[in-house]
Image (cartoon, grey):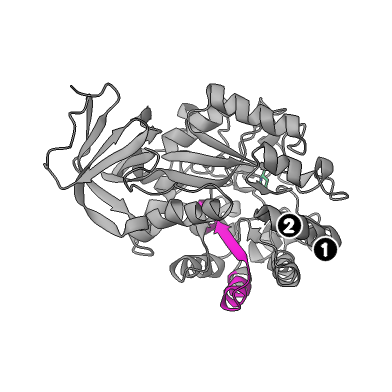
């Protein structure tokens, strides 16, 4: 008798960096778990009810995003848990960690429980909430961190803003240490970055826009590393964007300090020249286009090269989208006034595969940074078992075509946030099916 829920993904190329798997094969999912991985054409141990043909496609563990903004509660005009998780599914993500800069912020039990309840009712994929470091994200007093961890928070972050007070950051690390959870910091010295709207460099000078120097990030990265050393607490550095930050993290890791780090697809693939608005690859861009505005800002070619090298050297642990959906009203205004952020869940894979197609990173390495890399971080934070196709693991699987060419049409996004500078660009590579807990949540 075929099991009613058993799904065979047949004829694909399996890539699972968690077990060094990179070969053609079939995979059977049943009862929400990976039931079996076999050679091409080998008969599965039970008859599937459904077959997903995957010839010519890559089959890998579902992608994990350590950093996205789902905006609920409070900013439902930008995104909701339903639309954000659908966007995640379309992008190949089966797990997303959502940030706490909602309204009210996720600094109390009720808000964290609300997010988990909404996600259980309406979410297309797994949602792991990140709670605030400080009450109201105001940077004054610590949130009730133990209580928030008890409610299901997997980390703490005031993202959108850094933890500006060094003293508060120290205490946050001391409180988080026995909970076994990281403080995810948006590293930025606001006294240096204040008023800046893009990278401080020649483009900002030419356009007459105030810049944020790379040092504004690096000062904060250095501070966080020193505090990790002082307290033994775990700092996870968010959206690193500069060559200097990579060097600092390299030194910290050499010393064996409890530091992990992420980088976004846009900081790996795009540079500050795009604010000038002329680019053959991004046809819709105009000078001072607010869709290029993001925090931290798009940096220089040298920074991009250093970030890619950081990935290859294992200095950076994960790629995270920092999906930051905004409304037209938030973005269609002067550059200085526009909201920062890029709607990134649905373009992440295509943008990142550009690195593979240009020979800048290998495909298994890229997949590792979207699966086993972030999974290692979640495991250390008490969420084991993700980011692998090993038998018994949750049946979270992404099937993608690394070569499919498509034109980015923000109006067709599942996300409410259409704020992408990639509008009209042609990307090569796209998720074709996303399976979460054995259920097909997206099929292209
Ligand atoms: O560009 C950004 N947008 N950077 C952040 O850190 C926050 C995010 C947002 O919430 O819109």
The residue at which mark 1 appears reads as 166
| Residue at point 50%, 53% (across, down) | 374
Q: Position of residue 345 (x, y in %)?
A: 50, 40
Q: Which of marks 1 and 2 is nearer the N terminus?
A: 1
Q: What element carries label 2?
A: loop
Check the picture and name the quadrant holding the N terminus. Answer: top left
| Residue at point 73%, 61% (across, down) | 212
Q: In this view, does 234 lie above or below 438?
A: below
Q: Position of residue 209 (x, y in %)?
A: 73, 55
407 sits left or right of 420 in the view: left
> Comparing marks 1 and 2, which lies closer to the viewer?
1
157 sits left or right of 254 in the view: right
Nearer to me, 239 or 141: 141
The residue at which mark 2 appears reads as 208
419 sits left or right of 338 in the view: left
Q: Quadrant of residue 244?
A: bottom right
Residue 430 forms part of the magenta stretch: no
Which stretch appears magenta? 246-267
Between the C-alphas of marks 1 and 2, the distance is 32 Å
Q: Where is residue 415 in the image (x, y as percent from the top left)?
A: 53, 30
**Neighbour tally class for label 1: few under 14, some 14-19, many 20 plus, Cα within 10 Å:** few
Q: In which quarter of the image is residue 427?
A: top left
Q: In this view, does 100 lie above or below 256?
A: above
Q: Where is residue 371 in the image (x, y as percent from the top left)?
A: 43, 51
Q: How many numbered marks are there?
A: 2
Q: What element carries label 1?
A: helix
Determine contact: label 1, label 2, CB under 8 Å. no
| Residue at point 27%, 56% (across, down) | 21
């Amino acid at each position: 008798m075929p099991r009613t829920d058993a799904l065979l993904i047949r004829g694909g190329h399996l890539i699972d960096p968690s077990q060094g798997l990179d070969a053609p094969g079939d995979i059977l999912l049943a009862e929400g778990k990976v039931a079996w991985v076999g050679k091409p054409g080998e008969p599965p141990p039970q008859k599937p009810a459904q077959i997903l043909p995957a010839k010519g496609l890559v089959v890998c563990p579902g992608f994990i995003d350590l950093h996205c903004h789902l905006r609920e509660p409070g900013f439902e005009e930008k995104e909701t848990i339903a639309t954000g998780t659908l966007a995640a599914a379309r992008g190949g993500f089966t797990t997303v960690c959502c940030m706490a800069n909602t309204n009210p912020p996720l600094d109390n039990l009720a808000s964290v429980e609300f997010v988990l309840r909404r996600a259980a009712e309406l979410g297309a994929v797994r949602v792991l909430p990140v709670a605030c470091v400080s009450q109201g994200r105001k940077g004054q007093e610590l949130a009730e961190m133990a209580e928030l961890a008890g409610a299901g928070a997997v980390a703490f972050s005031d993202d959108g803003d850094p933890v500006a007070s060094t003293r508060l950051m120290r205490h946050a690390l001391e409180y988080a240490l026995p909970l076994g959870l990281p403080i995810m910091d948006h590293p930025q010295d606001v006294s240096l970055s204040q008023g800046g709207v893009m990278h401080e460099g020649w483009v900002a000078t030419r356009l007459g826009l105030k810049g944020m120097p790379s040092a504004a990030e690096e000062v904060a990265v250095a501070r966080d590393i020193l505090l990790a050393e002082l307290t033994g607490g775990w700092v996870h550095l968010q959206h690193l964007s500069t060559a200097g930050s990579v060097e600092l993290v390299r030194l910290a890791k050499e010393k064996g300090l409890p530091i992990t780090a992420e980088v976004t697809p846009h900081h790996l693939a795009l540079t500050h020249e795009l604010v000038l608005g002329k680019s053959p690859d991004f046809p819709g861009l105009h000078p001072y286009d607010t869709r290029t505005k993001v925090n931290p800002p798009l940096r220089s070619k040298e920074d991009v090269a250093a970030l890619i090298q950081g990935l290859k050297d294992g200095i950076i642990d994960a790629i995270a989208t920092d999906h930051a959906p905004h409304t037209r009203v938030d973005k269609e205004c002067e550059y200085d006034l526009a909201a920062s952020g890029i709607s990134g869940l649905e373009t992440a894979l295509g943008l990142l595969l550009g690195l593979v197609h240009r020979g800048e990173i290998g495909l298994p390495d890229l997949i590792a940074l979207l699966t086993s890399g972030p999974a290692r971080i979640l495991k250390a934070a008490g969420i084991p078992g993700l980011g692998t196709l090993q038998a018994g693991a949750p049946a979270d699987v992404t099937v993608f075509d690394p070569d499919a060419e498509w034109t980015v049409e923000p109006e067709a996004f599942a996300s409410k946030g259409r704020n992408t500078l990639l509008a009209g660009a042609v990307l090569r590579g796209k998720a074709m099916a996303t399976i979460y807990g054995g259920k097909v949540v997206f099929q292209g």
